[in-house]
Every structure is written in C-alpha cells, then in structure tokens.
Amino acid sequence: MVKSDYEIKKEICEIGRRIYLDGFVAANDGNISVKVDDNTYFTTPTGVSKGYMTPEMICKVDGQGNLKEQNQWRPSSEFKMHLRVYQERPDVKSVVHAHPPIATSFAIAGIPLDKLIMPEAIIFLGAVPIAEYGTPSTMEIPDSLMPYLQDYDALLLANHGALSFGCDLNTAFFRMESTEFYAKLLFYARMLGGEKEIPCGEVKKLIDLRKQFNVSGKHPMEKLCPSCYAGGDAVKDLTPSEAEAKVGAGGCSCGSDASIEEIVARVTKKVLEQYK
C-alpha cells in the first residue's frame, strides 16, 4: 500500500519520539530519513529535538538534498550521510542516526561490536563495525562508510554515534535498538569478567535460521566466522592478509574448538586455491 506524504511524516515523528524517549539522542541530536524514490526523500529538520517534531517540520528533498517543498525548516545537515547509504544500497528505504549512550561509548573507545554472544544479535545484526572518524556535516563521514555498506546494516561512527538502516523505517529503528542492546550486554558481561562466545557449530545453526526467517538486509558472518560458516567456504572471499589475520586471532571470532593447526591448514588451503 502506498503511503501518503503525511503518513510518512507522521511515522518519522513517531520514530523520533521513540529515540528521544529511549535516551538515544539529547537536545537536537540525531536524524532520520525515508526514501520514496531516487529523487524523493523525507528527512528530519536541523536544529529540532527529535522528541518534539510535528509532521509539518519534516522536509521533503530530492536526490541532492534540495527542498522539494518549501517550509520554514531546513533539512538535516547530515542528510548527505543518509544519501550515501541509499546510493550504495538500493534495498535500503530508511536510515536512522542517533547517539545511543553505550553503543556510542564503544565507538568512542574504538571497540567494535563483533563478539558472537547472543543468538538474536547473530541472526539479525551479525556485527557492528566502527567507521573511521569524520567531521559531522562534511563528506568525510559518507566516505568513511564505504568499506562497510555492502556487508552490514548497522555501524558505529567513531567518536560520534551509530547509524542503522533497513528496508523500512521500523526495521532501521529496530536495528538501532538492537545495536544499543548488544552494546549493553557486552558492557555488562565485561563487568562480570568477560564474554563467552557461542561455539562455531552453533553459530552456523543460527545463520541457517536467519535464512529460514528470510531476514532482509546484509550479514557479515562469512567474514567473522570463516572456519564454520558454510563449512569454511567463505574464506575464499577474504584476501590472504585477512585470512592470515583470522588465523593469528585464533581462527574465527566465535570461539571455535578447532585446533590452531586445523585452522591454519583450512585457511592455507583456501588461500592457495585463490591463486591456482
């Protein structure tokens, strides 16, 4: 069903209210957008609290970020970051940027959310890497996203916050919620002595469940867990240096029970196959 402009604007205001009440933004922080087509987007205005927006504040812009409907508000100065996601990911229809406190603390500390600690996080997020720092409102941030957009649906922004995206507005918002929850669990686990990751074989089962659930978006598990995902075939997608790094880290990141010798042999075989 095609939604009217007013309905889309109302939905953006509701998600803005949620991220404000969840404590994911303070004051006028954060921004939200929805894609209608390649030349029509709705985005939150600059300088307005996301918890107090009304539909007439939402800006309708074109593919260059220029207003398509004149009003007294200006579109978010960070809409160019959203545009880069839309340009690189045709499947994405909505983007949410916020500053969830614990996830943002991981971004400030330079710690990615890449530990395989909870089934739901593995199935629906996979991992959340950190994009390099860029000055807000410049092209530095859109450019910093490029290495990650094809493999992830949520990112930490170094010293800045988090970005999530999906096939619709609710999906993008839920991924922001999941990112903060993942960060919170990892933070608490480390306060209690450290996380215990899910074993390799169990990770493979969870990825199979993701396929059964027909979850939309991208998933990085082939890179995070090459020694167990699809029998290790995903190692062929790694460069030799990436494969070597996996071995140096003790194989994959999910707590494999395989010996170092087995992992080295497996990865070496895959690397050599690339050069036949």
Image: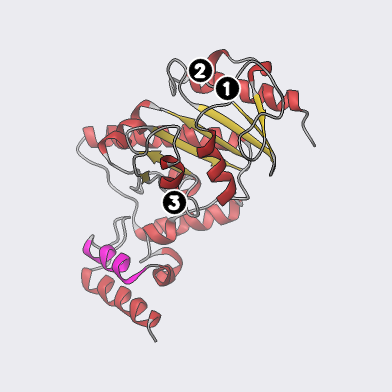
Q: Which-is-in-front pick, marks 1 and 3?
A: 1
Q: Are marks 2 and 1 in contact (CB under 8 Å)?
A: yes
Q: Amino acid at mark 1?
A: Pro
Residue at (32% x, 71% y) in the render: 240
User: Which residue is farthest top?
Assistant: 52
Label 2: few (<14), some or many (≥20) within 10 Å?
Answer: some
Distance from label 1 to label 3 (Cα)? 27 Å
Magenta segment boundaries in residue numbering: 239-248
Mark seen at residue 139:
none
Say what amino acid the circle numbered 3 marks.
Answer: Tyr
Indicate the amino acid at tag 2: Gly
Please tell me whether the stretch drawn in magenta is mainly helix, strand or loop: helix
Tell me the residue that label 3 is attached to. Answer: 148
Q: Check the picture and name the quadrant holding the C terminus.
A: bottom left
Q: Residue at x 68, y 16 (%)?
A: 56
For the residue carrying disc 3, how many other residues have a C-alpha within 10 Å: few (<14), some (14-19), or many (20+)? some
The correct choice, above or below, for 246 with respect to 122 in the image is: below
* Element under disc 2: loop
